[in-house]
Image: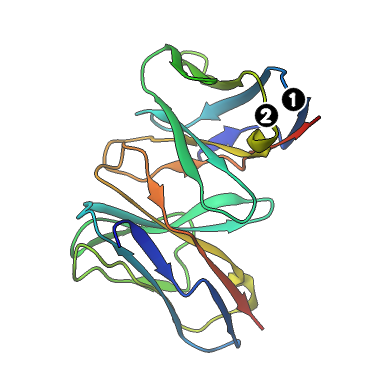
Amino acid sequence: DAGITQSPRYKITETGRQVTLMCHQTWSHSYMFWYRQDLGHGLRLIYYSAAADITDKGEVPDGYVVSRSKTENFPLTLESATRSQTSVYFCASSGSANYGYTFGSGTRLTVV
Amino acid sequence: GQNIDQPTEMTATEGAIVQINCTYQTSGFNGLFWYQQHAGEAPTFLSYNVLDGLEEKGRFSSFLSRSKGYSYLLLKELQMKDSASYLCAVSIQAGTALIFGKGTTLSVSS
């Protein structure tokens, strides 16, 4: 299917566990982004990538790791999940950092 | 730091016109975006302004004044389906990611 897909849609994990959120896009867009969305904070940038093997930190990168070995995939890993990482996570892609982004459907993560 | 301000909530009635304001104070400016987000869904792109003035797209228009650090989204002939959050986002530099405001939740009633 064409587009941008995130998996899983919902995830419950325990404190201290490692969890990986997946993001896959089929347009060969150069840019990919990870945001988290929380009530009262809006969308906050975690990491972004301008191309394969190029990543950069955003506003709230602590506790997260990303990789981008292939243009189409941009997984986000929580190394040791904490309750404060309970959030909705959105992946997005764009042909340019200045074009409109297309967002995935989001992953709702709950850390208990 | 970067600052983008929007009203938290607005209400309006069907058929009316509503204006959602966004002010920004950022270290640079390379364009302003508006997104719509329905509850439980992903944001979707509405409009993009990089030069001063009004951009019209059907019932939606977006205005930018770079000297004032100000933008607004104008929604005409409101419909119930326009009930959503509207997100203002700024690109501060080419090649960097968008910075989003906290969003304005619009409720349209009949």
Q: Nearer the viewer, residue B33 or B79?
A: B79
Q: Residue B51 carries which label?
A: none
Q: Where is residue A62 in the image (x, y as percent from the top left)?
A: 47, 68
Element on which disc 1 rests = loop
Q: Contact (CB < 8 A) between labels 1 and 2?
A: yes
Quadrant hosting residue A2:
bottom left
Tell me what residue is drawn at x 36 percent, y 46 percent. Answer: B97
Distance of label 1 from label 2 (alpha carbons): 5 Å
> Which residue is under mark 2?
B79
Number of numbered discs: 2
User: Do tags 1 and 2 sit on the same chain?
Assistant: yes
Q: Position of residue B101 (x, y in %)?
A: 57, 39
What crowding class fits label 1: few (fewer than 14 Cα within 10 Å), some (14-19), or many (20 or more)?
some
Tell me what residue is drawn at x 56 percent, y 54 percent. Answer: B41
Answer with left or right where residue B68 lies relative to residue A71. Answer: right
> Which residue is under mark 1?
B14
